[in-house]
Amino acid sequence: MTTLTDPPAESFKLSMLVYDTRYRSYTFQIIALIAVLTLLGWLTNNTVQNLHDLGKEVDFGFLNTPAGYDINQRLIEYDNQDTHLRAAFVGLLNTLLVAVLGCVTATIIGVIVGVLRLSSNWLVARLMTVYVEMFRNVPVLMWIVLAMAILIESLPSPRDFRGDTPEATMKLFDTVAFTNRGVYVPEPLFSRGIGDLSVFGAFGISLDLVAIIVVLIGSFWVAKRIGRKADATQEATGVRPRTWHVQTAVIVLPVVLLLILLGFHLGYPALKGFNFQGGTHMRNSLIALWLALSLYTAAFIAENVRAGILAISKGQTEAAAALGLRSNRIMNLVILPQALRVIIPPLISQYLNLTKNSSLAIAVGYMDITGTLMGITLNQTGRELETVLLGMLVYLVISLIISGVMNVYNERKKLVER
Amino acid sequence: MSDTHAETVLFVRETMLEQQEPPSSIVGPVGWARSNLFNGWKNSLLTVLSLAFVFYLLSGLLPWFFSPTWYSTSLTECREILAGHEGACWGVIRERWLQLLFGFYPSELYWRPILTLILLLLALGPVLYTDYFPPKLLYFSAAFPFLMPWLLWGGSIWMPLMVAAGFGIGYAVFAAMMKVANAGISLFVAAVVAVLWWIFLAAPVANGIASLVPLLPLEPVPSRNFGGFMLSVTIGVTAIGCSLPIGIVLALGRRSDLPLVKVLCVCFIEFIRGVPLITLLFVASVLLNIFLPPGTNFDIILRVMIMVTLFASAYMAEVIRGGLAALPSGQYEAADALGLDYWKAQRLIIMPQALKISIPGIVSTFIGVFKDTTLVSIIGLIDPLGLANAIRADTAWNGVYWELFIFIGAVFFIFCFSMSRYSMYLERKLQTGHH
């Protein structure tokens, strides 16, 4: 005889808030919430009190006042009568510029070094180990400051290029000048350019550049379609039609045509008076930061690449070889797709680190968001709270975007298990 | 069978051939070079190129490195000694190495940071090398965090003693509460009592006793005199020591079943990891005074330590969370099946294994934190890099940079490289699988 009866209904007692597991979690969470809210309230209260005492209410109006300082390295038009907001935007673009340049270079160096560290050549593997250990175990700030010191102290000044027997000459067939004021490289010019596209009247984007990028994307899309079609033919008939010459032509010809139409030519830097004129001037601060961040991050990327390749078991190579694949096919079709799954997540977090480390620009005077908003703007307006919080917010948004990308990638590449 | 076989074959060898030496081309240095340096034309090319590179580097570097300028007193004098040759100017290191190590710490008190370093090594010994040190030394390791500030900053010993007393009081309250309540409540009440003691009572009591019984008063050294590697090590060791426990708590919080606790931990960790350390240091240098009650003005080094610790904790939490996630769920279930409660399961089953898995990550976080202590030079503290800038601004050494950075880089390299080697040793020691 089985009778199912409910357990005797207990009346709620206060002690159950602590001893009964059903209620205990709520008790703890409410205590935690109260503690955090109290802390936040206390901090806010102090802040309001302190700011009131200093006579500075929280106010972001300063962003619309003229900045009054110059920024020598900039991607968009800016002069010292523009607002602090625009100065901060110039700084943000500078941060993104050095971050993108750094990520690209660091990836290239890192992949090469990582692969060479696994080389069967003893000497090369050792050299790469020395490089990796040297850069990983010394602070990045030191590399940045050192790179800056080398550029300033060891390169010739523009005046050394003057005279009939100059002490210094331009490099690479007289097109690039390395000076202690920065590097002057040829700049792309368009004699029949189609002008700038004004974005909200705030800054212009070169339409020539946009046109080139659009054409390139289109060509690559077409080239890929040709490749797909070749794949389909191969699937159906077993014979792969030769397509590489068509693909190359599809990619190269339209761009060349467009460049000719736009009247593309290079503007070379030339010494005029005491300094170089013309060409694109890359400041030493940018180069030092770019170089140091790339070399430093590349050492970490090299380790990630090495770990990724080592993580693929040898059986995979052997199985692929047993299927009759050639060694480059083994790498492309079997090892890399698996290794990339291991490499990409830490790679992206290295990009994140590089972007955050670019804030060290302030040590060499490169005007990124830290140097403009949290540097000169902070000092000129005395708005510590607003500027630092705004700067943190900017970095937080950049970081969240990058980690969002990483999450999407991880989700797509996740191993599908049972 | 064998007989017929013997009859059909004219000659059968009855003894083994003498073993021969392998050909000289595959053993010895030549064989090694052939298989490791010159197997195939690509590798041979790489080897030759690398050799040329190494030769080029060393032929330039070695003469530069061994230059007789140790006793020079300025860059001009170096140039005179070198007479047009390229060479390092090591005089700057001879003249300024004490400053690079100790900053502007009073030179007659150098024994204090040196003693602190020796005691630090002694305190780390039983923690890092459990096999070679008596376990009793762990009591000293526990006391060291209170000795360190007293030795470095000076003042009366009562302040660190009173801070230590907070732990004693907390423990006493915990023991008393255990008789009437469970562990969670007791821990909570004990923590509250200890924090109240530290905030409101520790300083007045310490000052009161110190004015009555001045026990072992050391000459106070203000924070602005701290600098050089002493500053880096002080900030680094504090941040490293504090970030591990805070990181563990944050990692457990992030994996907690309590949604609110989880959200709070995630927000904290992602916020700290999303911003560069330099912005947190700006907070320490310009904003912390605004966040705290009016009139509070505490030491800049302490403020920086707090910020670096928070920064390191967030990264540590992620590393430990990785270790927790890598642990097979069978371990959690086994702990539950044994009837262990949450804290016992964590302490006896989960954490020892999770921490072991995370050793490489933990140590690389430590290395990162130690390297990041150089960032304090940007907010005006005089760490080695800040000092290097100051020395280069001196007219006597204006233009010297390689020598200083080589010295600073070498010291950092020794610290960081030994940390990474230690982590490899620890991994091998704790290795329990069969490999």
Image (cartoon, rainbow, N blue to C red):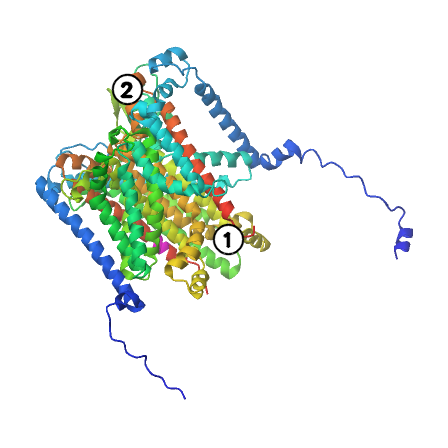
Residue type for callout 1: Val
Task: Say if A194 sits above or below A7 in the image.
Answer: above
Q: Check the residue under mark 2 and report the chain it is in.
A: B
Residue A259, picture quadrant: top left
Return the x and y of residue B341 as percentages of the image width and height.
38, 62
Using the image as rendered, state which of residue A318 and residue B418 is in the foreground.
Answer: B418
Return the x and y of residue A102 as percentages of the image width and height.
34, 39
Task: Say if B67 sits above or below B7 in the image.
Answer: above
Task: Say if A182 sits above or below B94 in the image.
Answer: below
Q: Are marks 1 and 2 in contact (CB under 8 Å)?
A: no
> In what quadrant of the picture does the N terminus of chain B appear?
bottom right
Residue type for callout 2: Asp
Q: How crowded is the residue under tag 1: few (<14 C-alpha within 10 Å), some, or many (20+)?
A: some
Give the residue number, with chain letter if any, for mark 1: A334
As for residue A408 lying within the magenta part, the answer is yes
Q: Check the residue under mark 1 and report the chain it is in.
A: A
Residue B394 numbered tag: 2
Task: Say if B167 sits above or below B27 in the image.
Answer: below
From the image, give the main secondary structure of the stretch colored magenta.
helix
Q: Secondary structure at mark 2?
A: loop
Name the residue at the bottom extreme.
Answer: A1
Using the image as rendered, state which of residue A151 and residue B289 is in the foreground.
Answer: B289
Q: CA distance from mark 1 to mark 2?
A: 59 Å
Q: In screen coordinates, is A399 left or right of A107?
A: left
Q: In screen coordinates, is B51 left or right of A140?
A: right
Instruction: Give the magenta part as a residue range.
Output: A405-409
Using the image as rendered, state which of residue B162 and residue A290 is in the foreground.
Answer: B162
Q: Secondary structure at mark 1?
A: helix
Q: Is residue B150 visible?
A: yes
Q: How crowded is the residue under tag 2: few (<14 C-alpha within 10 Å), some, or many (20+)?
A: few
As for residue A217 lying within the magenta part, the answer is no
| Mark toward the viewer: 1 or 2 | 2
